[in-house]
Image (tube, coloured by chain):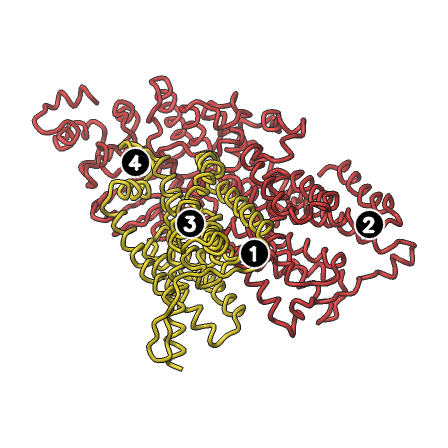
Chain colours: A yellow, B red
Amino acid sequence: MTELLLQQLLNGLTQGMAYALVALGLTMIFGVLHVINFAHGEFYMLGGLTAVLVTASAGLPYVVAIALAIVLVGAVAWVVDRIAVAPVLDKRDGPSTVLLATFAVSLLIHQGVLQSWGPTPARVEGIPGAISVGSIVLGHQRLLVLVTGMALLVSIELVLRRTVIGKKIRALAQSAYAAQVVGIDTARVRRTTFIAAAALAGLTGALLSPVTLFTPAMGQHVIINAFVVVVIGGMGSATGAVVCGLALGVLEALASIYLPQEIGTAIIYALLLAALLVRPQGLFGSARA
Amino acid sequence: MNKISVLLVAAVCIALPFAFAGNAYYSGLAAYAAILALFGLSVNLTVGYLGYVSFGHAAFFGLGAYAAGLLVMKVGLNFWLALVLAPLPAAALGALVGFASARVGGAYFAIATLTTAEILRLVAANWIDLTRGPLGLIVPRPRIPALEGLGLSFHQYYLAFCLIALAVAVEIVRRLINSPVGRSWTTIRESSALAESLGMPALRQRVINIALSGALAGLAGALFVPRTLVLTPDLFSPTLSATGLLIAILGGKATLIGPLLGGLTFAILPEALRFIDEYRIAIFAVVLLLVVRLQPNGLVALLPWFRGRAKALVLQVDADASAPIRFSPADTLTASNLTRRFGGLTAVDDVSLTVKPGELVGIIGPNGAGKTTCLSLMSGFLEPSVGQVRFGETEITGREPYTAAQSGLVRTFQQTALTPHTTVYENVLSATYTSIPETFWSSLFQTSSYRERERQRSSLARACIDLVGLGARASDEAGSLPYGEQKMLSIAAALATRPRLLLLDEPAAGLNHTEANQLSSLLRRLREFGLTIAVIDHNLRMMMALCDRIVVLDRGKLLAAGSPSEVSRNPDVVKAYLGPGRKKEDARAHA
């Protein structure tokens, strides 16, 4: 039993890393642009799709897939920003219009992949091999997810604290107006944040697809979980996104031992409503009016 | 609704079922259009009037359908009775989701509805004993023998019921949006701080709106039961939620006719476009993107007679419009030992002051002295770190901001706060919410005493507009006014709440000399009408001439208080304004 628990804990951490990274991007976009990017899950899915196409269809090494996932998803995000985010952001009802526009984009991306690829799942060959301690197995791919994820989290923290662009991003998150006053090109910082967060989601998708199998629906699944994470963690809080993302992955994995999967999912979604009722600003959010 | 419209709607409800007599396909399609329109109307309540996007309205629709189906199958109720009860659980769910998310904002509402629909879909799919899961709950067609005895076919009276339900729902929404309740939604949507300052409970009104929206969606879902006859978890699907959203947005946000157009479009188009069925969602998405980018006002904006609507609004004002306004005497406003810290900064430091009934008190101080913070503390918009505020016997500290306004203590904002896309008249009319109040139900039933009060609201609004000198601007769009007039408009709105004590935050900032003079004479007149006023401003010349008493703040502390001449001779005040080493004469010259 202990072994099963430990095994599930490891599996949960891997999945939780995906939630943490996707939710981190979501919460960064919310912090800087003050909008919800509904298409964020589809960026994750596109990362997975890139991995499938590069490795299974084109026969190239997995490393190329990871690099391409970052570049391609970043490019898609640039287009999405140009057509659905930047032009409507400062208009009347900007935030809700962006929510609608990115919702439309998410449907378009999902349907586009569904129509061209079909609903069938696909395997992605990641890094083969595994480490085993007793009966507990940690695949190399899962190890890669955990190590890369940690490295990404640390470097994002360093970028935000130490670099000029990081400081600009934090300035904008505090006050877009004040940032503009001191000469920060706010439009550019917003675009950079959006594209970087999307590329992060794409990279995460490419990392996770060998673990979870690629399906066109993977984006829809991850986005709702990421929503749960950012609401419970506190919208705009990076710490909240990471901690709650990892916790959600572990919780989901442990729950799957005792509960049918769909019931577990329903309970996790219900947690979101309960969190809103009890602590609407989130665990790591600061109280606002 | 006038008699002609009632007759017209009744005629349509009766004639349409006969027009499609014997053709189950067309009358079924018409009933489906009515259900979709009702669903779109419900989504439009939150998206259009509240500005809250919903990604899970299928939660309410599906809950209504399942509630009706289960009442019939498990309780044995007649379907048509169940139809009346089915919206209730959906309304309760709306209130719950609304309460959970509206405290933190619209983005949370979108997420909360999305997950609520998913939860219900999973429950419906897995609670096999109750719902039969994915197999579906089969509900027999609810025939009414009495009506069939009269020679009506099922399709005819089903369509008639759908049309009647839609007509009733449209009438409910029409009445509410033209009532104090609906007008408060528009104000809350624009700025909940403004709404609270005018005494509107933003959270409660949002919850009411979302609960009503849930009820209407639940009714639509229940009406859908005889059309589908098999209830499956797909009733909670994201596609259905997206359809409702698209109906509301494509048709035209915040309009009554929009959802009707949208509903009709979405009933007919998928039928007409069957050959591209697999691309349907993609086409929906493209349409949605095009609408929000190119025509945010939806199909309605394409109708020729709709365009000039805002401009053409005719004011219904009674002859006794400009009856003089009287203000009830204020209580003493007592602020004791107020301190407010923001992180390491103490913006207001142990300030005690009182405003007595009938006074006109000025609060002055250099930039950063803590004047606005002080005003926000006194009006209940900010919680003090230490200290308390009382208005007569009423405790202001620690309560919702709108309660201060409801007890007669009303503030304005430094930045002009108004609803820019409605007229001057509508802005001030919506501010009568507190002074001549209505409940949700009185706004819905609109008895003759309601109509009398509505006339009073109208003349009060008109009188307030005239009082600040905007009479000629009454039917202009508020956002189109020049800056000075917008400031006057926000004062007019504050006056329409019939305050007993008015707190003005820099009303003269940005005004030119003439406008500042007009403001001074307005404030003097208001005091003659019995209004107690506390005003913050930088225009010392105006303040010294205007106020009975001046309170000076500097770096968060109370520096001096007294008559204008006492204060201007106070050496501390001179030092605070001009720095050390200046002479008093300089201070006078500047004052």
| Residue position marked by numbered label 3 in the rendering | A69
Q: Quadrant of residue B68?
A: bottom right
| Subunit ID for the residue under disc 3 | A
Residue type marked 4: Ala
Q: Secondary structure at mark 3?
A: helix
| Subunit ID for the residue under disc 2 | B
**Tally of marks:** 4
Q: Earlier in the sequence, mark 4 or mark 3?
A: 3
Q: Is residue B442 visible?
A: no
Q: Nearer the viewer, residue B512 or B330?
A: B512
Q: Residue at x 33, y 77 (%)?
A: A133
Residue type marked 3: Ala
**Residue A127 spot, x, y in % from top left:** 39, 62
**Residue B48 spot, x, y in % from top left:** 57, 42
Residue contact at pointers 1 and 2, CB within 8 angstroms: no
Q: Earlier in the sequence, mark 1 or mark 2?
A: 2
Q: Nearer the viewer, mark 4 or mark 1?
A: 4
| Residue position marked by numbered label 2 in the rendering | B25
Q: Which mark is residue B94?
A: 1
Q: Nearer the viewer, mark 2 or mark 4?
A: 2
Q: Secondary structure at mark 1?
A: helix
| Residue position marked by numbered label 4 in the rendering | A178
How far is disc 1 from disc 2 in space, using C-alphas?
33 Å
